[in-house]
Image (tube, rainbow, N blue to C red):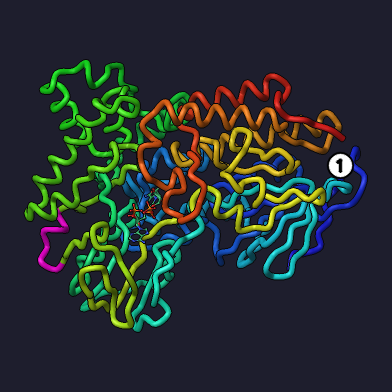
Amino acid sequence: MAEARKTPVEASEPGVMDFDVVVVGAGFAGLYALHRLRGMGFGVKVFEAGDGVGGTWFWNRYPGARFDVESMEYSYAFSEDLQQEWNWPDRYSKQSDILRYINHVADKFDLRRDVQLETRVTSALYDEEANLWVVETDRGDKVTARFCIMASGNLSTPRVPDFKGLVDFQGEHYHSGLWPKEDVDFSGKRVGIIGTGSTGIQMIPNVAKQAKHLHVFQRTANYSLPARNGPLPKGEVRDHKADYAARRKAAYFTPFGIAGYPPPEKCAIEASPEEREAKYAAKWAQGGTISYLFSYKDLLVNEESNETASEFVRARIREMVQDPETAELLAPKDHPIGTKRICLDTEYYETYNRDNVTLVDVRSAPIEEITPSGLRTADGEYELDAIIFATGFDAMTGAILDIDVRTTTGLTMQEKWAAGPRTFLGLMVAGFPNMFVITGPGSPSVKANMVVAIEQHTDWIADCIQTARDRGLSRVDATVEAEDSWVEHVNEIADSTLYPRANSWYVGANIPGKPRVFMPYVGGFDRYKVKCDEVAANGYEGIEMTK
Ligand code: NAP
């Protein structure tokens, strides 16, 4: 149960509340929100479903889980002391190192005392009359707070497809996002992995090294680029740290919130085939996804240009995979490169050259059911000791919609988002005063370096709350007009690119029945930040602040 700690109530506000702010989730977002708001003198309570902090990096412990953005960039910038003292061993850190980092942050900033673990928020009710949020949990807590911050994550609601027969499966089964803490040993086992997104692609080479035989059930091929991961050279780390503050600042002026990649100036269609080939080859050798997307400036807006970059990767797949039929199945043809999250791998394609790995095309012959001893597709039966679901998440809206969010005036989030999420800047939802979302739908979120996006959001929210406090006001709500025009803008930008061409979780395509709405803002983190800063500079234009 939440301790009945009363925090000082601001002089301008009548009534008593348990906390100034309740935060949902103790991942990168929730922990920074706690630190930032506590620093402003607020009483903050964080509820976290896991039995440890870390969010995504607490839950996703599957073999091969690691960053796909470089460690030196994908980490907190708010403390110079922290970024100087921490040493990332690898260019793309593995999950155990990331979790160690987050735990270090929790200890260094004394965050644990305000985090209640193993507690899932079940409902959040805005009491219009009292101007308070009433938050309830699955542990029986019922607390009130002026503000409610959803730091519940974009990819935190794991999804196992509704396959017939799973309950009768005699072997072990796992979802990548709910991986056990103890090591799982697949030695000597016949394993099936369903799903070839970023998760499956990171996991497959690792499971293949252990399993007696691995069947990979692929519905859609994805583009994956070599990570070229390895230990971070000491000199590189030293140089980076010497310039850390400037690099962090520079990240704010880039479309992905990642510094160190000069933006391209030329279009692919303006280059000769030889020039393009040389450029893509250099990027391929360098590794990393941003680097490749930054080959030319029109790759995400011009189909013809994109095809040159897509075909370069297909050609590499055909070179790496010995069996031509398998290579053809692995070469994506149904979407332009970059319109789905590009995967980053270590020896993914080469894994299909192993004798103990078989690729099964479940596009042409879908999985029909899980049987007690394996699974059956439309054209075959597979005997399996273990099944791994790398089948993704109810992305971007799942975690918020799992909570019964409503107001005493009768508005519910389920209804409000029935046709797809609507937000102002991905930060606020009109009609739900004093509720903020960190990296919500309508913000760059997953299309940017998440930690940079999280810090920018949290700082903006903190400044907004501070402004209301300075004005003696305690109710903050986005207007419907501001929200409508933001949603329109997000859609316009998406429609001017190739992104909507892919059936991805960006549009909710992986969840049967989910409204097809393009959820992230793809206009670039830099542009987005300018807009957020403008809103603040114009006295929180589009937001009503009242008593
Ligand atoms: P995902 O991209 O949604 O991929 C899910 C996979 O499962 C897809 O291949 C999908 O096929 C397949 N699938 C789903 N239902 C299926 C069914 N009924 N039958 C057959 N196949 C089915 O999920 P994810 O790989 O977990 O990645 C989600 C996101 O998490 C990534 O895009 C990335 O943003 C993030 N992530 C990041 C990292 C990192 O930073 N290092 C690592 C992992 C994940 P279809 O494509 O045909 O639907």
Percent from the top left, x then y, of residue 435? 71, 44
Question: Would residue 440 be found to the left or right of residue 191 on screen?
Answer: right
Q: Image quadrant of residue 11? A: top right
Q: Image quadrant of residue 404? A: bottom right
**Stretch in magenta:** 350-356
Percent from the top left, x then y, of residue 283? 21, 32
Q: Pick whichever, 258 or 361, lies toward us.
A: 361
Question: Would residue 5 be found to the left or right of residue 515 on screen?
Answer: right
Q: Pick whichever, 45 or 49, lies toward us.
A: 49
Q: Pick whichever, 7 or 81, lies toward us.
A: 7
Percent from the top left, x then y, of residue 243? 42, 28
Query: Residue placed at 14% from the left, 49% from the top?
Result: 328
Disc 1 under 8 Å from ligand 1? The reply is no
Percent from the top left, x then y, of residue 501? 36, 37
Main secondary-structure element of the magenta-colored stretch: loop
The residue at which mark 1 appears reads as: 10
Query: Residue placed at 15% from the left, 32% from the top?
Result: 281
Answer above or below: position of 5 versus 250: below
Is residue 452 visible to the viewer in this orientation of the structure?
no
Query: Residue placed at 61% from the left, 67% from the top?
Result: 118
Amino acid type, label 1: Glu
